[in-house]
Image (cartoon, rainbow, N blue to C red):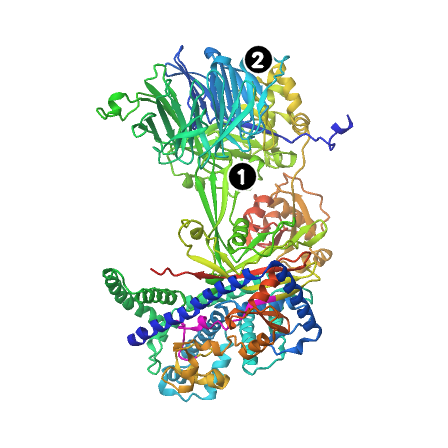
Amino acid sequence: MTILEENVIPLRSKLRLLTTNPPAKQLLKRKGAFQEAPVSKKLELDTMLNGYRTDQRGNGDAVHDSPVATLSNMGNTCFLNSVLYTLRYAPTFLHNLHHLIGDLALVSSRLSQTKAKTSSLGRNVGAITGPSSRSTSSKDLLSLGTSNDIIPKSKVQIVTEKLHELYITMHNLEVKESSDAYQPVALLQAIREANYIFEGNHQQDAHELLVYLLDNIRETCDLLTQQVQQNPDLLTETEIIPSPNSSKIWNVRRSWKKTHKKKEKSAKEAINEEQVNGSSVTDTEDACSVDSGADNAKKKLGYNFVAEDFEGVTLRRTKCLECEGVTERKEPFYDIPVPISVKDTELEGDMSINSASEIYRKACVTSEKLCDANKYLCEKCQRYNEASRDVLFEKLPNIMVLQLKRFTTSSAGIQKVNTYLPTPLEMACFCETCCNVEENEAPPHRYRLCCVIMHLGASMASGHYITYVKASDHLEDYAECSRNMPKGSLSASSSEKSLNFLKYFKPRTIGGSLTDSKSILSKSMMNGVRMCKSMDCCGVKINKNVVENVVNSYPRKHGQEFYNGPEDMWLECDDESVRPITSQEFKEELSYKPNSTSTPYLLFYSKITDVPLD
Amino acid sequence: MANLKPGGQNPRKKVQVSMVICEAEEKRHRSGVNALQIDPALDRLYSAGRDSIIRVYEHERYLHGMEHHTDWVNDIVLCCGGRHLISASSDTTVKVWNAHKGFCMSTLRTHKDYVKALAYAKDREQVASAGLDKSIYLWDINTLTALTASNNTVTTSSLMGSKESIYSLAMNPPGTVIVSGSTEKALRLWDPRNCVKLFKLKGHADNVKALVVSKDGSHCISGSSDGSIKVWSLGGQRCIQTIRVHGDSVWALLATDSFSHVISGGRDKKVIMTDLKNPQNSVVVCVEEAPVLKMCFTADQQAVWVSTSNSSIRCWKLPTEKHFKEEAKMPTSPISLIPGGAAIRQAVVLNDKRHILTKDANENVALYDVLRARKVEDLGQVNFQEEIKNRFKVVHVPNWFNVDLKTGMLTIHLGQDEVDCFSAWVSARDAGIRDCPEPDQKVNYGKLLLQALFEHWRGVEKDPENKLYFTVPKHIPLILSEVGGRTLYRVLVGDTVGDTENALLNETVPNWVISNIEENCTGKFIKVQFYLQPHASVPSHLLKQDRLKKPDRLVANDFIQCRKVAEHILEKLLGDGNASSPGGDADSTTPTNNGYNVDQIELTCNDQILDPAMDLRTVKHFIWKSSADLTLHYRIVNAK
């Protein structure tokens, strides 16, 4: 097994290089191309593209095939579709959701097993003992299925499961290359069941739904953690069960292994220190092994990925100007509200990354003085004094959601503010660490735009939501998954038995462990890197041909090549119509247009941690 | 005049009544000391306390206190050769005092926020005041001291241009230049002779809290919360030296007459003397036990008095050439000490809403009685939390006052209006009134205290209904102020007899206070709404059928005891209910028409059996624990 680990790391780093370097190059290229375009031409292009778009819309949706599965509007459900599209393409989301569902199934099956075991010793015990009783009868399956229902599922959990099911369906549609739009009825039903505010066929706030869904998943994670804590034997039992056929490591055991690896690592480090010009390969190797080690610790059963990926921490620092004592308060958050002034500031579309980032930094990282009638009650001075209050971000999430405060409540009801704010494709991080970096040093994180939910229209009630997402299969999320269970199965269980009965449910997703059939092996390997099987369950599968076709069909009027490969593509998801566009087109879409009511509303940025190369 | 009617365009701000529970003479500072001044001729030290009192020490012995401020005194200046003292306070006023006799001559109310700093130009007898309202006013002291009750208009010049709260101010003796330090992080300069704005000096990274200007007005030293001391050439309009000797904010500065050395103190509790010609050469004068707030030279300039955010003031010997050359060691103890008292740091109002348990800076715990405005028990250094727990009673009385500890003493702010102030009704028995003819008669805490506070102003009522049960000591300061804002009037309870005081009180005391202390009005009781429901065990034949259909919502005064409710049940809900209403002192053992007596009615709330002596607000607060309407269940026990 050690050998396996040794083999894996270089592969992983290889992938890392593959995925991180080219976009950087592309970015440079893109930037260059963009700067070359004269302003007049840009405007021309803008109007033409708009014309092109409306033409296409006028002709109906069936003009081209969609590169991905689509969702149909069931009447005022664009708020739902826009959020579903967004989450689907948000980095790491699908993968983590999959494992959460897997863990849920595992825990509930185990709970029922233990229950069955205590009630009737015998058959079930034999079944658990694993590989020897491979031929599990369908009776067993049924009994397990029904005992699953002994533990009542909460409405919250059902919503989470329905969400996952929806993504499985979308995946299957993509595999079949079906162009039918899918109606997310079941999910909507579950959402409405669990939360009354989404009842009725009204247009809803996409932001509200997003926060609700995230909360929902977080709650599901908490539920799972609770169950595991209440039944600690669930995990130990797994450890006792030998799984000789599996070359994979069950996570608990991996963490045990980790300690061994750490020792190895420290030895390695010692060597590195001796080498003055140590090869960078070893360095990255080390960085990777540290990463995966940390991942292991985190991504155990009931790993709360919502908290990890979407939750940040604000720090409110108040300093009394009299005693100069400082008090700090930390608060977790999901999204950062960005206030927008009603006054139309003269901002042109062509903004450098820095100045655009600066706008957001200034809007989010604030400093105010508590004075006049709004003095601060200092606990030390025991009186109201002037104070300075800084709001900063101790931690920004992996996926940062910026909510542009476009809807303001005034005496005339809720009004929309259409003031233009730039949407940079890349943004400097404004967490405390990055803000405190010395000027000549590069900050440790950056943010890259991955999804945008746009609000079209003049008011909240009459508006329409569309989503732009980065066209990506997010293969890197699945590479070297620490949670990679023997089979890319729903239950993510290590026990052979559960795998066998899963065969009856989803024959397609059944895969063997590495030692199993070759076909599966090929599927689970990509560029020599082992991929998590979950990508074959609910992962995104973009039809590359459609994307290529669309790109090729573009009239090359400007003598410029905007297309930089599929990595540079975006998808415009407008309910059942999903259209690939180049990042250049997307930029145009986001650029300043006078009096436009189609405005970005929710911006999703994914964190990029730059590994310093010494 | 129509617009002066209530509800017109210019409604007067709400007025709040407060009092400070203190000793007849507070000889020691209760809290930090913000400012110091020395009168070398008489060897008198003036100290301005956060406890609102300015104290005078002659030959280091307490002489007298100067009380008139109602909040922290932030700065003082001794002028006219020691005859007068000017003080600046967080009560937003500047006061002029007769320093020798110790009385307040006049109060200047021009500032709109805390007045933080004063500056004095000795040669011109001018004083400037500045504060958080961003304004600087320039006063002519001879005019100020000539003010009388009839001639009370002052003209002042103001120095315009400040953009942020001012924390420090300095002027040179000839009054040719004035410098201000503020949260703007820059120094601003004016010429006080013509009030012309000169220029701004940037360089500090944080608030500027201390300033000194050289006699000739050519140089200036500033101390900032950024931890640095900067020496500025005012002619060159630039910083010529940055001294970093402190590990934290610099809060106090003092320069020698010749401007050769600077003495600085700050948040790091250190006082350091630095040679300005050679800034590397600095000597730690002392390390105090709390952040240093102010320093002043002794008469011979060989030592400094140092005040801190603790109440004691110490005198430390200044280093000489020998110490600078490291030939001698600095003494580690002060040459003189004026001990301070302990500030009250924690106060917990007990459940009876009458007693307050306090803990002071020396960990001493004491018990105060608000109604009598005095300390009733010294408990010594006992466990505070334990003591709170021991004194916990299952009684709920609504809040009728707030406690404020900003001065290190108990300041009691009574409720801001009739509803708040008169919310606490208790029985005379519970209030400890022994000679009351009816122990169950309800008395109101707010009213009792107001009557006591204004006793000497209005005279004691002859009416026995309004008989005064409590008195407060005559030395207790009574403060009338705008809610959350400026002080309107401060007077000692015993002084309210005077004619001028009487007139001023007539102007400031809010009408609702006057009407309530004078008239024999019972006030408005606070009502509790509740439902009464029979327990399943109550035989249905006993219940009146019409009562069963829907639960009636009942309304009662919040101090009604459960026994009363039981009586109501007996009378109205059980049997035929034609009995006459039982009085408050009805003998509960007397059997009623339907054969049950009150003791057999058991009330429960949230499945908890209620004590008949418990009142409804206590039930709601401790057992029901919800803001929703209270629901009580009743059943019959020991049914015959």
Task: Pick whichever, B81 or B546, lies toward us.
Answer: B81
Q: Which mark is residue A370?
A: 1
Q: Is residue B280 left or right of residue A116?
A: left
Residue B199 position in % (x across, y down): 51, 28
Q: Is residue A296 above or below residue B84?
A: below
Q: Is residue A347 left or right of residue B2?
A: left
The crowding category of the residue bearing disc 2, from other C-alpha atoms within 10 Å (few below 14, some 14 to 19, many at least 20), is few
Task: Pick whichever, B239 or B524, lies toward us.
Answer: B239
Rendering quarter of residue B35: top left
Write the start and end of the magenta stretch as one range: A467-487
Q: Is residue A326 above or below residue A494?
A: above
The crowding category of the residue bearing disc 1, from other C-alpha atoms within 10 Å (few below 14, some 14 to 19, many at least 20), is many
Residue A149 falls within the magenta-colored stretch: no
Q: Given the image, on which type of amino acid does mark 2 rest?
A: Thr
In the picture of the structure, the residue carrying the numbered disc 2 is B143
Task: Pick whichever, A536 or B363, lies toward us.
Answer: A536
Residue B95 position in % (x across, y down): 54, 19
Q: Is residue A286 above or below residue A388?
A: below
